[in-house]
Amino acid sequence: MAQKVEQGKKYPVECYAYAPDPAKPSTWRFRLYSTPDAEWPDAVLVGSALLQFRRDSLTIPAEALPDIRARLASVWRQLHPDGRLPTVLDDRVPARQPAKERRRDA
């Protein structure tokens, strides 16, 4: 089983929200757990993953976005059982939209 080494610790694929190639750890993104054997997601890492997901969503294949959102929403609900999901996890709202060109009237 492949593992990704971060800060001297080996993390399994289950610690990440996005792993397009489970056999290739260099493709894994958005770590959610502070230790490889943690049973509970790390709130700081989940928050960071949400920001990274919003920023990087244009570089991720569109067909992968629903699964990433579902994974992030699942860990978010573990941490905030009574809270609202962040807008970026709403599958009705694009994670990030390309910047619109401004029209200049001359």
Image (spheres, grey):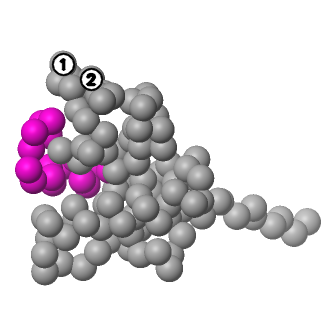
Residue 75: percent from left, percent from top? 22, 61
Q: Is residue 98 left or right of residue 11?
A: right
State left or right for residue 56 relative to residue 16. right
Residue at position x 24%, y 53% in the image: 46
Residue furthest to the front = 1
Residue 7 position by quadrant: top left
Q: For the point 21% across and 26% down, which residue is it? A: 10
Residue 30 versus residue 3: which sits nearer the camera?
Answer: 3
Residue drawn where x is 8% and y is 50% of the image: 39
The Cα–Cα distance between marks 1 and 2, rounded to whole angstroms, is: 6 Å
Residue type highlighted by circle 2 = Val
Q: Would residue 92 be found to the left or right of residue 72 on screen? A: right
Query: Magenta stretch: residue 39 in it?
Result: yes
Contact between labelled residues 2 and 1, with CB atoms less than 8 Å apart: yes
Give the extent of the magenta segment: 34-49
Seen in the image, is 77 located left or right of residue 100?
left
In the image, residue 74 sits, relative to residue 44, either above or below, namely below
Q: Quadrant of residue 35?
A: top left
Give how far across and how far down residue 27 sits, in percent: 46, 34
Graded by Cα atoms within 10 Å as few (under 14), some (14 to 19) or many (20 or more), the crowding at tag 1 reads few
Instruction: Please give the residue where the numbered disc 1 appears in the rendered image.
Output: 8
x then y, percent, for residue 22: 41, 38
SS assignment at label 2: strand
Residue occupying the point 83% across, 65% down: 104
- The residue where tag 2 is placed is 5
At numbered mark 1, what does the secondary structure look like: helix, strand or loop? loop
Q: Residue furthest top?
A: 8
**Mark linked to residue 20:** none
Q: Amino acid at mark 1?
A: Gly
